[in-house]
Image (tube, coloured by chain):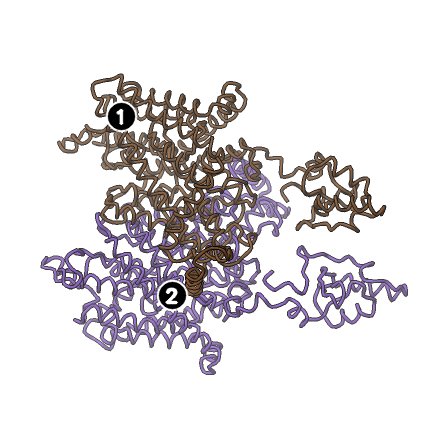
Chain colours: A brown, B purple
Amino acid sequence: MKSFKKSHGIETDEEDNIQKQENNSEASQNMIPLLLDSWKPYRRPRAIVKELLLKLRERLGSVCGIQWYCFATLGILTALLSFLLDLSVAKLLRAHQWLYVKLEGHILLQFLCWTLYPACLGAFASTFSHNICPFSTGSGMPEVRTMLVGIEVPHYLSVTNMFTKFLGLTCTLASGSTVFLGKVGPFVHLSTMVGAYLDKLSSLIQGKKKEEAGTEMLVVSAAVGVASCFGAPVSGVLFSVEVMSSHFALRHYCPCFFSAACGALTFHLLYVWSGDGETLQALFKTNFPTALPFYPLEILLFALLGLLCGALCCCYLFCHRWILKFTKTNRVFLKMLTTEKGLYSGLVVFFLASLTFPFSAGQYMASKYTSKQLLTSLLDSRQWSSQSHNASVQLELESLEWRSSGTPIFLSLAFFLLMKMWMLVLACTLPLPAGYFMPVFIYGAAIGRLLGEGVAYMSSGGRILGQQWTSVNPGGYALAGAAAFSGAVTHTLSPALLAAELTGQFSHALPVLLSTLVANALARSRDRPSFYDALSISKKLPHLPSLKKAFPQIPSTPLGQVLRKKSVQLQKAAGPAEVQSAVNSSSEAQIPVVDSHESQVFLGFVLRSELLLFLHRCQTQHMEGRLDEVCSIHPNLILVSPHNTVEE
Amino acid sequence: MKSFKKSHGIETDEEDNIQKQENNSEASQNMIPLLLDSWKPYRRPRAIVKELLLKLRERLGSVCGIQWYCFATLGILTALLSFLLDLSVAKLLRAHQWLYVKLEGHILLQFLCWTLYPACLGAFASTFSHNICPFSTGSGMPEVRTMLVGIEVPHYLSVTNMFTKFLGLTCTLASGSTVFLGKVGPFVHLSTMVGAYLDKLSSLIQGKKKEEAGTEMLVVSAAVGVASCFGAPVSGVLFSVEVMSSHFALRHYCPCFFSAACGALTFHLLYVWSGDGETLQALFKTNFPTALPFYPLEILLFALLGLLCGALCCCYLFCHRWILKFTKTNRVFLKMLTTEKGLYSGLVVFFLASLTFPFSAGQYMASKYTSKQLLTSLLDSRQWSSQSHNASVQLELESLEWRSSGTPIFLSLAFFLLMKMWMLVLACTLPLPAGYFMPVFIYGAAIGRLLGEGVAYMSSGGRILGQQWTSVNPGGYALAGAAAFSGAVTHTLSPALLAAELTGQFSHALPVLLSTLVANALARSRDRPSFYDALSISKKLPHLPSLKKAFPQIPSTPLGQVLRKKSVQLQKAAGPAEVQSAVNSSSEAQIPVVDSHESQVFLGFVLRSELLLFLHRCQTQHMEGRLDEVCSIHPNLILVSPHNTVEE
């Protein structure tokens, strides 16, 4: 595996270098190590190249700091990844659809095609990511949040992980709306990895030490991840403000915007160049009527929708927490998830796919649509339940997947909501690289659509609500529902802006914001953990804000209680005997030093190596020293006494 | 004046109370002080009312914290103020217009009406605000920024100031596009005052002490100010993120959004109820074509526009800094501005008005338009310079104020830009309550329009740029120019989003963001101070980020240099003689204590009162004590040594 990792590392390095040379920026310092090996051939040309690159670096540095080139490259690379992912997923989905249509008439073969294709992809993604890099499963968002707090999470930013995640994610998304998972979370993670790599490169070029780099790249990467996933720069920046646990540093603000704009621009331009659109447009462009987007009194209905979304979100999050606990306690699940990940994924995906098979329950829940088509259909501004006499509209509505079975669309939507709720919760247990934001967004759109269709049905023709509401737009409700539900699940407000950026529709900005606020208020009440909080707690990540929500009494627990449990600590005036016993009983590299065992005032750390040296000297020179006279105590920045609470 | 202040205080209190009773929320605790005076009549009814209100408080508090009601009230009150301001300004402007039209035929009378009306309003605003509350002049933004750093600025949040600012601002805006000033800055200041008042009320209700309140209300107020000024909630929140000097605390994020949404909603609903619109719509709604908003290659032109705006912004800011310095050094200006503010304002406004008189230079710069009409006309999506054969369009374009004099619109626009540049700089010296954002926004729109018209002219009919660009939209350039120029002047990025929220147009979001980023990069290069920075420096406000830009060497100045100038400091081991001399030479309540005069390591403060006690004891008991044995040294939270720089 190691050799594979290596060769892969070189591969991506090369790929990156090509990219770099295009930008004529960062490659310069990469050459310097080459010149140190004097036995290598072509010294003279290499010296010339090096000089040219150094000059280039100087010239570039005179325009603006090298880190700005890095930010631009980060945006461009992530957008490129996003575009490549979309492209390959679209090809895989089309292949599946083509095969399914070709098998028309053979129901058994169609069933096998419908179920085995995603099941195999799921099993492959699961096995592959488990074997190459087990850290690549899940969305990666909880880990990114932990890293943003300032805690290092090893292996999460390696190049292997990036490769694995990208491939695994492609397979997951190619399983289509059967598995019904998204790409936002993994994309934030992927962009973090690209960012970490570029950060290393930038500090190499600038000759900085590694420690000085800080979390800047991480914060920027979070913004870029969202921005280049949807081509939505402003909500990307808002997301990166939200994802910080306590404070957002203003010096990251401009880099975030700059990088996100580069990412979004590249993403849209790639779409235009690939022939998918005539110009730079929103991803899910809608055609809401602009003259009268909604009636003022509908504001109340939007607030009601927010309440509804909030309530359903609480239900969803409860199920999610329950299944997280269940998979950790149930012996069958636990065994499957630890040893037979591929089999588990294959089986679950097969089960989900057989349910969504268009000749079984799938016909009632528009299962032929891909996720994108689902969202587009839900955001449609025309009323589905209309008794229109316009023939062309009637014809177009007839071809709607939602009413393909002949059932009323209200029943279809309700059935969709009911089934997808538990299917989504089940899909969240899959050990695959996958995002959980987009499905929630679509689910919310379906909630909004149901309410919107209801209102439109009641108002059309002045049947119940009187004559004044003649043209209610159910698409607006779907938009608000999507933002409200996804915002409530993740405890964020940026989906309200994301909804506007995704559809290019700003006329509904206020009602969408209102729904999102109401849903958030309901979801956050009583310190309920968000979706990511639940994952953080379940994965035992050191993320204090999540912990606070799970155990509200934590911030006021005296630190003494926590520290005393470890109890391997040294007094300031410790003699060799005490040091010996401490070294024996603890294996950590740093051992805490307290003022005295009674006062428990924490002074700092001593390195284990220094302790060993101290012991060695005592033994050889028969010296009786005190710890604080011989070893240097590395102070902690904050003075901590046992009466301080954990929060401080 | 004092009695006036008092009576005014009661007035606004009453007004607030009416508002409160409508919301049934905060008025409760206000009643308690009444009951303490036992001699007052109606004890029984008052007791019942008090009990009811206490119950109400409890009931309200059980839903969510009292502070959330405060946030909602803040939004609603500020939006109400904004609406009232708009209403009265519109009425005053219409009166002026009516009078001007009535005098048709008498050029001299028309000239007097055109010039004296705004001159009188300006002189009144200036005199009034100078006499009632001298702190109410200017935009108030620099002071708000200083307060957000955590420094208290006295008198800036008083109720008198609020009243004066509101009335003065009404007069300033009623002078119309002659004076060409806006309302954003003062509105942020006004909302801060409302916020501070509500904050006091909330801590009274919750029984908190004043110190616990913190800057939360200030941050929220900044967001609400922008949100209820334009009905743009998201850019309000982004603005409040930007206005912070170093960090944005995430716990303010939700309150900001909530309060801004309340403000924007109220603002729009008030507009609907007043009959100005059928539903909640953007303030400057545009009708850009949605099918093909712009060609991909136009992106380059938008970047060029950003460069142009950045360059013009540098020019504008240079002039602004020069005039700030000039008014401080020129003796005539200095005397006028300190003693004869009313006269100065009147004269300057008269001069500006005589220039914009429609029969003089005004005919070349569309001076008949109000600021709102100017912006609406500039954002129009139809090409002005077209040789359209459509009669109705032709007719409508003929009535355009920009070509009223018969000059080509290119010359009109260029003349407008040239004249308004120095007129705006001159208007900035007026000692009135006024905002400087909106004029800059409109100025930027004119820059964009000029470029856009040029592109449209060259492309129409395939004359120069070939057949591929047939329908270039000059309104999009105006939008991008507005965001870019105003963003560059204030060194912010939120105008990019504000432009989208003001027009309800998200199709141009990416090019607008690109222009804003480019313009910002140019304006910020070489540590140039922003508009607000220049004001902060000129007003000598303690705002570190501004100072840094004015004197880039400050952050690296050793602290020792700064502290040594004061030099009244005590050694840790100081005897009575040294203490005596320190007490004599310094009059401050806290005297710094250093480890020793050589090391200059700063330990903390001793209170002057303790020093006096120490001296007294030494004298009476003939004791020879050391400072650190007798007095307690109050430690500072951060250990500061003279080698630390000021920034730390």
Q: Is mark 2 on a helix, strand or loop?
A: helix
10 Å neighbourhood of mark 1: few (<14), some, or many (≥20)?
Answer: many
Q: Which amino acid does label 1 sit on?
A: Ile
Q: Is residue B426 left or right of residue B277?
A: right
Q: Name the residue under label 2.
A: B171
Image x and y of residue A542, in percent:
57, 38
Binning the other alpha carbons within 10 Å of mark 2 as few (below 14), some (14 to 19) or many (20 upward) gives many
Q: Marks 1 and 2: same chain?
A: no
Left or right of residue A183, residue B289 in this image: left
Instruction: Look at 54% across and 46% down and name the residue there.
Output: A246
Residue A432 position in % (x across, y down)? 43, 31
User: Foreground residue, B600 or A159?
Assistant: A159
Quadrant for residue A44, please give it: bottom left
Viewer-closest of B321 and A102: A102
| Quadrant holding the C terminus of chain B | bottom right
Q: Looking at the picture, how far across and down is residue A235, in whole percent? A: 39, 46
Q: Is residue A573 above or below residue B618?
A: above
Disc 1: which chain? Answer: A
Name the residue tied to disc 1.
Answer: A409
Give the CA separation, mark 1 to mark 2.
58 Å
Is residue A230 in sight in this rendering?
A: yes
Q: Depth check: give the residue in front, B488 or A332.
A: A332
